[in-house]
Amino acid sequence: DAKTTQPTSMDCAEGRAANLPCNHSTISGNEYVYWYRQIHSQGPQYIIHGLKNNETNEMASLIITEDRKSSTLILPHATLRDTAVYYCIVRVENSGYALNFGKGTSLLVTP
Amino acid sequence: KAGVTQTPRYLIKTRGQQVTLSCSPISGHRSVSWYQQTPGQGLQFLFEYFSETQRNKGNFPGRFSGRQFSNSRSEMNVSTLELGDSALYLCASSPGGAGGTEAFFGQGTRLTVV
């Protein structure tokens, strides 16, 4: 699986959009970009995933650059409950679940 | 639909002992994977079981083992516990096969080795 690089930490004001970047410059053509988050002391939670098109669900939007070397997770209206560590992971769809979480980005949403 | 259930939630063991942790996946899910989380190393993959067979294995010593039963429930065992095995152990379930896209995690078992 390709390696990902994320900033260590970010801050965001409550109600504003949180934009979390991820670099995956060595991504292969059959690798998807996945995002999970982990709220303190809980198990990770799936957020969204995509291959090359932008994706949106009830939690977030995922913007993938045309060359697929980077992506951005967007939380459109961050709340205090979005404070968590966010992990960007690349994996081949329908492969096993040996997820490489890396260090992730610690997002702090402030009032 | 019930989520992923891990038991016990907390455990204290003495160095040198062995421990068994249990994970009940979401009904119908056939893949169960295990992770270790420590402050220093973060979330690290241990192994994955699919239809009672180990499908993937992380870089952990042989003291860490697991198995999966015909009902997809899984157990992991750690023998000869070391202080460094103190961690949050998480399991995740997914449909597996051709249709799986996301993994659902349990709340974890917090193991403390003294």
Image (spheres, coloured by chain):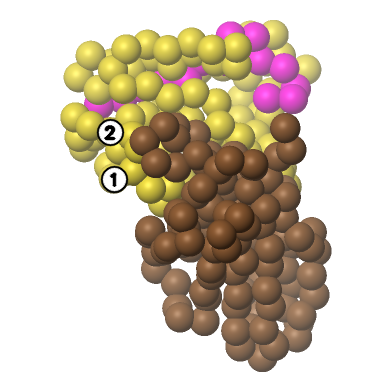
Chain colours: A yellow, B brown
Which segment is the magenta one? A69-82
A58 relative to A6 in the view: left or right: right
Q: Amino acid at mark 2?
A: Glu
Q: Which residue carries the number 2 mark?
A: A31
B56 relative to B77 in the view: left or right: left
Q: Residue at x 28, y 17 (%)?
A: A52
Q: Is residue B56 visible?
A: yes
Q: Residue at x 61, y 55 (%)?
A: B71
The location of residue A9, given as percent across then percent down, is 55, 35
Task: Tell me how far mark 2 sits from mark 1, CA to CA.
Answer: 8 Å
Q: Quadrant of residue A92?
A: top left
B110 relative to A71 in the view: left or right: right
Q: Which residue carries the number 1 mark?
A: A1
Query: Where B99 falls versus B4 (above or below)?
Result: above
The location of residue B24, given as percent across then percent down, is 67, 53
Q: Are marks 2 and 1 on the same chain?
A: yes
Task: Answer whether residue A21 is magenta in the image.
Answer: no
Q: Residue at x 60, y 75 (%)?
A: B77
- Foreground: B90 or B39? B90
Q: Quadrant of residue B81?
A: bottom right
Q: Which quadrant of the figure contains the C terminus of chain A?
A: top right
Q: Residue under mark 1: which chain is it in?
A: A
A93 relative to B15 in the view: left or right: left
Q: Residue at x 46, y 55 (%)?
A: B51
Q: Which mark is residue B98?
A: none
The location of residue B73, given as percent across then percent down, is 62, 57
* SS for dot 2: strand
